[in-house]
Image (tube, helix red, strand yellow):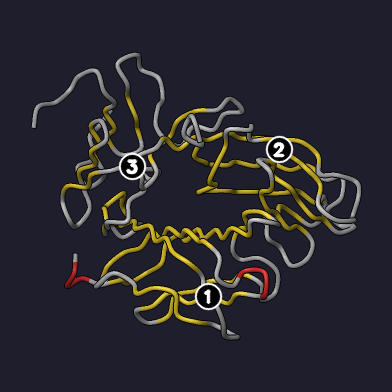
Amino acid sequence: MAIQTNRTLAIGSNVISPTNTLTGSLIYSETEQVVGTWIDGSPVHQKSFTGTLGSSTSGWNEIADLGSDSDKVVGLELYAYLPSYGQFVANYKSGLFVKILDHKVMVGVDSDFKSKDFWLTVRYTKAAQGE
Amino acid sequence: MAIQTNKTLAIGNTLFGGKNGTVTGQRYNFSETEQPVGIWIDGSTIYQKTYTGTTPSSGSGFTQLATLPSGFDKLIDIEMFANNSTYGQFVANYASSDLLVKTQNDKIYVTVGTYFKSKEYWLTIRYTKTQSEQ
């Protein structure tokens, strides 16, 4: 195998790129980035969101917009922080539910989780142009 | 910097290390064909495989969804989604019994509530294999 010197070199936990900066798939950003490919070969995009959960405990509330061209969500990690109780992972009992509807990430929260800080990372495909 | 030869070496998209030698692929390159994507804490290879299909149309409790790859040992990660065209894409595990997933022996099982029967699903597992299958 020929070593391609314009690519990333990692030894142990140290990752070295030609410019000596960290790189790899575990870099989170609030800017959309391509992090892989889906089973049909289409790109998998990743985007992180941070904010505050809605104050309503009724129904579903939007916390992130994936864009009108988003299609299939293939990865989703949502956490919320309850002071005094800790960081919780969705879906936690009936307190922190999550789903995707009409290109938006929606959550349902109970009185414990309302108005709490959250951080969310979503990986998704996009609809092919013309679909 | 000292080179630790018992750890993973990655050049580009190719990882070298673990008990299985060369590992090719990235975590977020999904495939319905089993592929090595990383190294577990004991040095064994982590494999990844994606399944797609339709959830069971009937039944209560856990129902068989798919057969695990040969040599499946420890489940490292599982991501399952199901799409209800009216209510949206949901992430397992959802609610107390609406969309739950587990592995047992050589199978993947799901519990699906009314809104998740006969729905499109996609599921990715990451796992190690038994020594004999490494």
Depth order, front residue of A77/A85: A77
In which image quadrant can residue A5 be found?
Answer: top left
Tell me what residue is drawn at x 42 percent, y 58 percent. B124
Tell me what residue is drawn at x 44 percent, y 74 percent. B65
Q: Position of residue B67 (x, y in %)?
A: 34, 74
Which chain does tag 3 point to?
B
To which residue does mark 2 refer?
A64
User: Crowdedness of circle 3 by 10 Å Cα count: few (<14), some, many (20+)?
Assistant: many
Look at discs 3 and 2 and give the one toward the viewer. Answer: 2
The numbered disc on residue B110 is: 1
Looking at the rendered structure, the number of numbered marks drawn on it comes to 3
Q: Which amino acid does the dot numbered 1 rest on?
A: Val
Is A83 above or below relative to A46? below
- Label 2 element class: strand
Q: Which badge, 1 or 3, comes first in the chain's sequence?
A: 3
Look at discs 1 and 3 and give the one toward the viewer. Answer: 1
Which chain does tag 2 point to?
A
The numbered disc on residue B26 is: 3
What is the CA distance from the residue labelled 1 to the residue labelled 3? 27 Å
Depth order, front residue of A66/A1: A66
User: Crowdedness of circle 1 by 10 Å Cα count: few (<14), some, many (20+)?
Assistant: many
- Label 1 element class: strand
